């Protein structure tokens, strides 16, 4: 049903358009033009101004030809660095970059599959429900773009985000909540040789705090990690400042809260016992979600996948995506695997067959064909 050559060419064309986070302007303009040509009404929100970027989220609508509930499809327009000057090419069964940049299949694979799906609907005159498309900015910056999306503009209660690794056919129905902790220990400097009694080592406070934390795999749903610890100075001075950055994730909000509280307590008790102080900042990055396999988008995605002979598998992910915000705002949304591999590296690639399957899946979800 889909036109493979057209899909591959379009995918490579949009990979070649520069679109690092907060610099999505060129790609947003191109997608706006293409969606408009496909009959969509396209709006751009003011997220660009709010986050200091040069483009906002695109929200596009197409009236239905069948009286069914509206469906939402979404992807992000940005890609991680190095993502400027991408030169995609076909190598055997894959599309790859030239090795100096990422390919940007994350998330151009989703963008291209959605656009191809819309082209097929139009040229084959397939009946479809009302459709909404949201292309977000700055997803790679901890979901910044979708966190500013005005979701009151969206009427769908059944969403599909094309933005996960793994073979096409896999459906993400669970993702964790994440929190970040930034802590700065303040001790007291003193000469390490002449008057160590007068000093309070910020480095020792941090070390004590870390030994008191539960870290890495906490339970099947919860993880925690120290990402960085920074303190520098000469050996003859007791170091009075040490900064520590950590994160925790859980599929369960209560477990995340408990984990973060435990880490905060460890930081505070270490500082108090050693006579120093600690400033702690806890930032909640995004909420978790959990859908069951019978939820509308999960059921619909699975049924469509079977129709086009894709192996269906439901899974949980350890990372966040725009679906965390959509679900939290009352739009039940699953994430579809796109078949891309080694994302966020210059070895990123996608198999031609996987890209084609993704576009077929989109058509099947919408039209049942
Ligand atoms: Zn992505």
Image: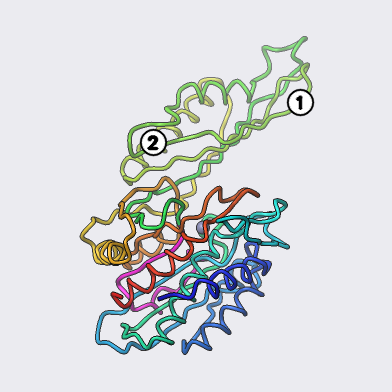
The reply to whether the magenta stretch includes residue 159 is yes
Q: Position of residue 154 (x, y in %)?
A: 38, 77
Q: Position of residue 234 (x, y in %)?
A: 79, 22
Q: What residue did someone put label 2 on?
A: 259
Task: Indicate which disc, 2 or 1, sits on the residue closer to the N terminus.
Answer: 1
Q: Nearer the viewer, residue 196 or 331?
A: 331
Lateral position of residue 146 relative to residue 10, left or right: left
- Tell me: residue 41, above or below residue 163: below
- Tell me: residue 131, above or below residue 342: below
Q: Quadrant of residue 141?
A: bottom right
Q: What residue did someone put label 1 on?
A: 233
Q: Position of residue 34 (x, y in %)?
A: 55, 83
Say which quadrant the N terminus sits in. Answer: bottom left
State which region is magenta. 144-163
Lateral position of residue 255 relative to residue 92, left or right: left
Q: Quadrant of residue 350?
A: bottom right
Front label number (2 vs 1) = 2
Say which residue appears at 33% left-offset and 33% top-offset.
Answer: 219
Q: Residue furthest top?
A: 194
Q: Nearer the viewer, residue 190 or 169?
A: 169
Disc 1 C-beta below 8 A from ligand 1: no
Say which residue appears at 34% left-offset and 59% top-offset.
Answer: 310
Say which quadrant the C terminus sits in. Answer: bottom left
Query: At numbered mark 1, what does the secondary structure look like: helix, strand or loop?
Result: loop
């Amino acid at each position: 049903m889909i036109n493979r050559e057209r899909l591959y060419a379009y995918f490579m064309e949009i990979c070649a358009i520069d679109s690092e986070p907060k610099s999505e302007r060129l790609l947003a303009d191109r997608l706006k033009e293409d969606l408009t040509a496909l009959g969509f009404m396209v709006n751009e929100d003011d997220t660009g101004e709010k986050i200091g970027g040069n483009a906002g989220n695109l929200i596009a609508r197409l009236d239905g030809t069948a009286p069914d509930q509206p469906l939402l499809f979404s992807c992000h327009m940005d890609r991680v660095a190095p993502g400027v000057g991408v030169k995609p090419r076909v190598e055997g069964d894959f599309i790859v970059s030239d090795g100096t940049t990422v390919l940007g299949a994350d998330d151009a694979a989703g963008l291209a599959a959605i656009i191809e799906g819309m082209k097929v609907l139009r040229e084959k005159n397939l009946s479809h429900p009302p459709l909404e498309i949201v292309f977000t900015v700055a997803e790679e910056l901890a979901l910044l773009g979708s966190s500013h999306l005005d979701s009151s503009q969206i009427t769908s209660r059944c969403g599909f985000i094309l933005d996960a690794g793994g073979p096409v056919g896999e459906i993400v129905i669970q993702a964790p909540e994440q929190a970040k902790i930034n802590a700065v220990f303040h001790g007291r400097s003193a000469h390490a040789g002449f008057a160590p009694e007068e000093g309070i080592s910020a480095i020792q406070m941090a070390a004590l705090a870390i030994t008191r934390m539960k870290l890495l795999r906490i339970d099947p749903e919860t993880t925690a990690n120290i990402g960085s610890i920074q303190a520098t100075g000469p050996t003859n001075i007791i170091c009075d400042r040490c900064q520590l950055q950590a994160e925790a994730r859980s599929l369960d909000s209560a477990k995340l809260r408990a984990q973060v509280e435990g880490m905060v307590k460890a930081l505070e008790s270490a500082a108090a016992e050693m006579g120093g102080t600690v400033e702690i900042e806890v930032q909640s990055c995004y909420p978790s979600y959990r859908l069951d396999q019978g939820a509308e988008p999960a059921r619909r995605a699975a049924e469509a996948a079977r129709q086009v002979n894709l192996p269906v598998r439901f899974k949980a992910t350890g990372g966040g995506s725009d679906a965390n915000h959509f679900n939290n705002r009352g739009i039940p949304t699953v994430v579809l695997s796109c078949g891309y591999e080694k994302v966020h590296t210059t070895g990123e690639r996608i198999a031609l067959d996987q890209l084609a399957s993704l576009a077929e899946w989109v058509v099947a979800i919408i039209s049942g064909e």
